[in-house]
Image (tube, helix red, strand yellow):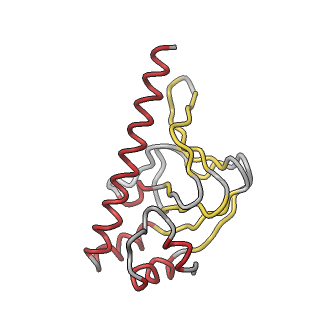
Amino acid sequence: MVGLEVLRHSELFEGLSDDELAAIAHIAHEETFAPGTLILVENQAATDLYVVRDGRVAILTEIGRGRQTVIDTVMPGASFGWSTLVPPYVLTASARAMAQTRVIVIPGAELRELCHQNCQTCYTIMEKLATIISARLREARLQLIALLQA
């Protein structure tokens, strides 16, 4: 279990009540990744949601011929692995630790179950999630434009 304060300061969980945060904290745990560690691999099953506590994570997407490009950098308080909340639960990007990185790991199936039990919690999380997805899409478009102009 992780502390409520850590979750309270996450962009994804801002605005949730202490009871809602406690339910999430109860299913969460922490992990640490060394610099360069590949945390998630694009097109694999999405099983967990991650919130960065310390360090930073590069979000990468395949651009062909075995090449990847960074479409976002996730800093403390931000999250990645959102595909675990959205069918078909397949990762849309890879994630690599850019520094020594400590994350909160929240099992997707358990978080989805919490959402089924409390629609208001789910609405708040999904509204924040839509904002994150929108920003990543915008960044991916900018990367694509830059690649096409090069």
Return the x and y of residue 134 as percentages of the image width and height.
35, 45
In the figure, is residue 57 to the left or right of 36?
left
Query: In this view of the protein, which residue sits in the foreground, 115 or 123?
Result: 123
96 relative to 113, above or below: above
In the figure, is residue 116 to the left or right of 141?
left
59 relative to 46, above or below: above
Question: Who's the residue at 61% across and 52% down the image?
Answer: 39
Name the residue at the left extreme: 119
85 relative to 67, above or below: below
Return the x and y of residue 111 as percentages of the image width and height.
40, 71
136 relative to 3, above or below: above
Q: Quadrant of residue 140?
A: top left
Q: Quadrant of residue 18?
A: bottom left
Q: Quadrant of the N terminus?
A: bottom right
Return the x and y of residue 60 as percentages of the image width and height.
54, 39
Question: Who's the residue at 36% across and 59% down the image?
Answer: 128
Return the x and y of residue 30 as percentages of the image width and height.
62, 70
Q: Quadrant of residue 82?
A: bottom left
In the figure, is residue 5 to the left or right of 148?
right
Name the residue at the bottom extreme: 19
Numbered disc total: 0
Query: In this view of the protein, which residue sits in the foreground, 138 or 25?
Result: 138
